[in-house]
Structure formats: structure tokens, C-alpha cells
Image (cartoon, rainbow, N blue to C red):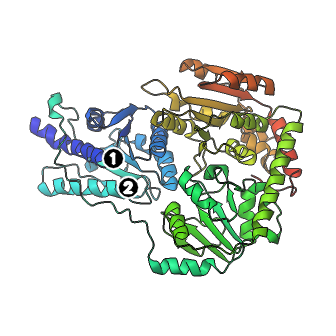
Amino acid sequence: MDTIVKQNTQHIYDLVELCARKGVRNAVLSPGSRCAPLIIGFSKHPDIKTISVTDERSAGFVGLGIAQQSGEPVVLVCTSGTAAQNFAPAVTEAFYQNVPLIVLTADRPAEWIDQWDGQTIHQQNLFGDHIKGSFNFPADLDQPENQLQVQKMGNQALNLALTPARGPIHVNLPIREPFYPENPDDVHFNSGVSVNAKINNNNSADDEIWLEIEQEAKQFQNVLIIGGQNRLDPELNEHLVQLNVPIVGDVISNLHGVKEVTRGADFIFNNAGIELKPDLLITIGRSVISKNLKLFLRKNKPKTHWHIGLGMVGDPFRSLSKIIKMNPLDFFKGFLKRNISFQTKEEYKTLLLGYDQVAKTSIQSQLDDFEAFNEFLAVAKVMKCLPQESVLHLGNSMPVRIANFIGLDKHHVEVWSNRGTSGIDGTLSTAVGHALADQERNHTLITGDLAFFYDRNGLWLNRALPTNLRVIILNNDGGGIFNMIPGPNEQEGLTELFTTPHGRTAELTAREFGLDYQTASSSEELEQALDRFSHGILEIFTDMNTNTAFFKKLTTESIRGKGELL
């Protein structure tokens, strides 16, 4: 019996050891029988912390949050069947945000696929194109060549996840019974497990490329840098300031620490004139929120467009002409070290900053003058009260857009949002993962009511919820965005199919999970609640029609008139 157990499980324990040797410090486990050897292995490894999350959909996003905040690879484990499919939304988000999730799915041996055996589906290549690589272990390891293949495959998979640009990988593990060791001493980790194929982190450009960059940089006068979604990097921000070039950054770009960064892109580029067209456009980071910025640059294409970054490169402005495969910080360090400069007209930068200041003043004036309490005013008050050196998480749909309209002035607040796919699923779970990985700072999540209720299982952990997390719910009784954008609110008798009013509150959820619960329905109540709110749930109630009225006022009275801000 001992021989069979070792044959069935030792390669699993070797894989656990390999993960630890490659830098994995956290594993998120979803319970099951077929995955028992994986659960046992990770829970017994001295260098890996484990957390159990029953719902795989939430577990995937908790792992995503831990990996984002820690900057380290995180393992996801689940049993066979549809359990693995429930990881797909988080894996997809990780793919578009370059997050190294190590997805380990237990499986039935191949001969049982399509034989009406329980929890048995096609698991190879389960995540399609939304994965850096998929690997399928052999089920039978009695042959030496199979044992060698397993070691080689494990190294290949983990190296792929950690090679820039990083991202998720999937290892599918068919496992035969028995799953459980007869003796706890049968679980041991082989310190001699093979760790090969050094990861290539080369992130530099040769002299020929730098010469080409220098020659091109001198040709253009109106240079514009646009920051897409990126993690907070104070060192990068310091180098960007030295360029003396106009910079546009959404709230998720984490460029609010850059002096004179332009934040009001949606208002500035709404019906903007040709005077704002750049000759050279430089993009860093990933997606941008501003629809008007995208529409403007698609219509007024720059002469040249560089993108600086690693991994997959999108072209949302339909103008990309050069990809410089470097980390932006390393690029701008090299750029400044070589004394390369842009011949930017000061008038171009002054024009952008002037428009930005007018937009900022206009937005604040409208927040102050609008009589009825609304979610825009609520978000502004929450953002104003954020602690320095804290973390802000923004839900998709309206919360991230509202925060982007208002702008963030606190330079050392780090902003995260699931804008890889921009779905509402996993918002709460991701923030929980961040708070677990970073318990020294305060974390604040601003999320919509539908997103919160959709992802309540993110609170269902096998341990106490982190007390450094504040969940702020904007409850307008449905999907308020569908009351604002053209189309849904014009469908007579069908509007509720889009806005989905529900009449629910988070009070019982807070009680179920033992969380502090507060509410606010006015500016005065919100200010009082924020004074005493340190963790738990704060639910802010607003009227959907009032929110829509303020949004229309905001967009029609901005400095450039009506536009499609959503």
C-alpha cells in the first residue's frame, strides 16, 4: 500500500516543494476529495500559508488580490469538474493584468472522461487563450520517463508564470486513488527536487534602439504621455516629473503622485479641438477609463505612437507604431541617463493644465451647488477622507468612473480595480485578498450594490476577515449606469430588466459575518459615519434618478459640453 500511495502522491508533494522554491508563499485552497493530495501538501509545507475559500469563483479573486498586493505568485487549488471552471473569471482578469496565478486543478484519469463518472469534464486547456500556458501531468508515474516529464513540466510551467510579462498558468493533475496517506509521516518534501531553467528578467535595450529613440524624440514638438492602469510606483513618478512633458492619467494609472498630471481627460477631450492633438503619443500601463480620450485620439491620430511595456500590448487609439519592450521605469531611467529630451512646446503643456484646472473647478462647483444627496458627492467625501498611505479599491461600472471624474489628490494612496476585463464579479473577493496580504495598511473598497451582492461569498473564509478592510457600498437599488447611458432608459417597459431593482440591503450579510454595519442617506449622516468608520460595511443609500440628474448636469455643464463619458 505504501508504494501505491507514494506513486500517487509524491509527485504532488514535489510540485508543492517546487512552488515554494519558486517563491510561492500563499495558496488559496477550495475543498474537494480529488484535490486532497494538493490540500495536504500545501497545508503541511512550512514555507507556505494557506487559506480555504469554499466558492472557487471567490477563491480565484482572493488569490488574485493576494498576488497583486504581494507581488508574489499565488497558487489556486480545486477539485475536478466544474470547480475548475469557476476559476475562469479570476484567471482571465489575471491574464489581462499580468498577475502570476499558479492554477492547479485535480482531475480524473483520462480513461474516465465522458464515461458518466462524477465531477468529470474536459479539463485540458480549460482556460483557452486566457492563460500563458496549460500543462497536463500524466496520471501514471510508474515509468521513469513519466517521472522525468513531471519534473520538467513543473519547472516549465512555473518559469512561464514568472517570466516577464508575468501571468497565470494552468497545471491539470489527473490523480488516482488513494488520495490520503495512511500515515502523516508519508508526507515529505524532497529538498533535492530539480529547480532549473533560470528565469530571464532581461529588461534593457541596446545602443542601436536608444539611438533610434533619440532621433525620433527630436522630431516632435507636441508630446503627450498617457498612463493606463498600473500599480503605484513612486520612483517611476519621480522620473516622469523630470521629463517636463504633459501627462494624462486616469485614477487607476496611479500617476496622481506626478506633479501637474492631467486627470480630467473625459472633460478636456470631450469635443476637443485639433490644438490638443499630439505629434508623439507615448503610452504606458494597460487600459484607460476615459472614453472621450479614446474617441478623440482615434479621430485625431498622432504622427507616431510608442508603447513602453512588457507583455501583451493593446492599441485602443488605433495608432500604435512602435513597441518598446521595457519596464517603463527602466526606460525613463535610461532615457534621462542618456540626456535624451523632447522638444515639447511649453504652450501645449500649459494648455492642457489650464483646461484641467477649469474642469476641476467646474466639477467641485457642481458638487457644492447640487442640492440633493447623490453618489457622486458621496464618493467625493469618501475619497477626501482616505488615510494617507492607504489603499483604495474601486468596483467596476459606476464607482471607478465616479472616482475618475472626481480625481484623487492624495499622492500616497494606491488604487486598484479589476479593469483587465472590467467585470463586476470578484470585486469584494479581490479586495479581501489585498487586505489579507497587506495588513499594515488600511484598505477601502467602494463598490456598487449589485457587485457586492454578486460576490458576497468573498466574505466566506475559514478565518476571521481582515479588520483593515472597509467596504463602502453605493446602494441605488440596482444598476444605475443603465439609467444614465443612452439606450436602456429609452426602452419603454423594459428598463427594469437592465437596472434590476432589488430592494435589498447588506445589513443581514454584515450580521451573518460578524461585521460592523453603518448606513448613510445624507451628507450629514455620511460625514458622521466616516468619522467613526474603521472597518466593516458602510452602506450609502442614494436615489437612482437623482444620481442620473446630477450626472446629466455634470456632463452638460462641463467646459466642453455634452459628451459620452461612459
Nearest the viewer among 516 and 364 is: 364
- Residue 519 on image: x %, y %: 71, 22
Quick one: label 1, few (<14), some, or many (20+) residues within 10 Å? some
Residue 332 percent across, percent down from the top left: 54, 65
Q: Amino acid at mark 2?
A: Leu
Q: Residues within 10 Å of mark 2 (few under 14, many from 20)?
A: many
Reading the image, the residue beneath label 1 is 23
In the image, is residue 31 above or below residue 293? Answer: above
Measured in 3D between alpha carbons, the distance from the residue under mark 2 to the one under mark 1, in whole angstroms, is: 10 Å
Task: Please indicate whether residue 234 sits to the left or right of residue 557 in the image.
Answer: left
Vertical placement of 105 versus 284: above or below? above
- Residue 33 seen in render: yes
Residue type of the residue flagged with mark 1: Gly
For label 2, the residue is 162
In-front residue for pair 73/242: 242
Q: Which mark is residue 428?
A: none
User: Which quadrant of the structure image shows residue 390?
Assistant: top right
Q: Secondary structure at mark 1?
A: loop
Of residue 49 and residue 358, the one placed in the foreground of this image is 358
Secondary-structure class at tag 2:
helix
Instruction: State left or right for residue 475 relative to residue 197.
Output: right
Query: Is residue 112 in view from this perspective?
Result: no
**Which residue sits at x=47%, y=44%?**
64
Name the residue at 59% across, 50% down: 419
Q: Is residue 460 left or right of residue 142?
A: right
**Corner quadrant of residue 385:** top right
